[in-house]
Image (cartoon, helix red, strand yellow):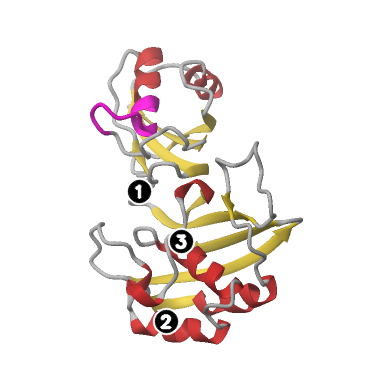
Amino acid sequence: MRNIKLTIEYDGKGFNGWQKQPNKLNIQGEIELAIEQITGEKIELIGSGRTDAGVHALGQVASFKTNTDISIEKLSMAINSQLKKSIVIKSAEEVNNNFHARYNCTGKRYRYIINNSRSGSAIYRGLEYHMPVKLDYGKMKEAIKYFEGEHDFKGFKATGGKNKTTVRTIHKAEISKDNERIIIELTGDGFLYNMVRIIAGTLVDVGLGKINPDEISTIIDSKDREKAGKTLPPHGLYLAEVYYE
């Protein structure tokens, strides 16, 4: 029995998220079906974690066990031949049988893209959040650093999701500009339900002057969802990278 690790890119538009659900188009189910078509096996694909409906991935990781003798060099190409063009297996590698895409994950990096131009984009409208009001990038840059470190992020969690604790560590919180696009990147040991989208929404409120940068610590300490910003839409969010030791 071989254990295969896949690195996956997908456009989440039109999918009901990662997780397999009956009668709903999802990423996990599509890849499982593609693997079955080329191997003749019904496999269980284990992802590093779920992404919600409309969320994209640049580097989702999943693993599955198989008896196929297809060479590892040809496997990703074979799976891609059976997939929709909005899902791409970027790489496949054979790993130790103890490897588990979810349980062995040590951290993730997420990206949120905001188009801060007046008109937005016709081509990229499903791949970024459009905010036509000019944001104060300097204040957003000042504010984002308050999210770094270990905190109880209860106030940045949407209802739903089962967590033993709401304490998480953000190792790196960065913001950058690419012309009129603002790119937020958060790297941490784990993230709560909608946490990245709520942090991004809070930073937008900072950019709009509704929240001062030095209020972020107080908002985090309050653990009050009502004091943080709104949850930004899913189509601006990307699972950029998954980390393993």
Q: Is residue 72 above or below residue 69?
A: below
Who's the residue at 49% across and 65% down the image? 201
Q: Is residue 197 above or below residue 82?
A: below
Name the front one of labels 2 and 3: 2
Image coords of residue 138 (percent x, y): 69, 75
Name the front one of labels 1 and 2: 2
Who's the residue at 64% across and 65% down the image? 175
The amino acid at mark 3 is Val
Q: Which residue carries the number 2 mark? A: 219
Instruction: Tell whether label 1 touches label 3 (CB within 8 Å).
Output: no
The amino acid at mark 1 is Arg
First in sequence, mark 2 or 3: give its number. Answer: 3
First in sequence, mark 1 or 2: give its number. Answer: 1
How packed mark 2 is, by other alpha carbons closer than 10 Å (few <14, some 14-19, many 20 or more), is many
Q: Which residue carries the number 1 mark? A: 102
Residue 10 among magenta residues: no
Left/right of residue 175 with respect to residue 83 in the rendered view: right
Who's the residue at 63% across and 40% down the image? 124
Q: Any mark on residue 183, and which?
A: none
Left/right of residue 110 with respect to residue 160 in the rendered view: right
First in sequence, mark 3 or 1: give its number. Answer: 1
Image coords of residue 42 (percent x, y): 27, 21
Residue 239 visible in image = no
Image coords of residue 187 (percent x, y): 52, 62
Q: Is residue 229 above or below residue 53?
A: below
Q: Residue furthest right?
A: 179
Segment tinted magenta in the rendering = 21-31
Instruction: Tell whether label 2 touches label 1 (CB within 8 Å).
Output: no
Query: Which quarter of the rendered picture does the N terminus lie within?
Result: top left
Q: Which residue carries the number 3 mark? A: 196
Q: Nearer the viewer, residue 10 or 212?
A: 212
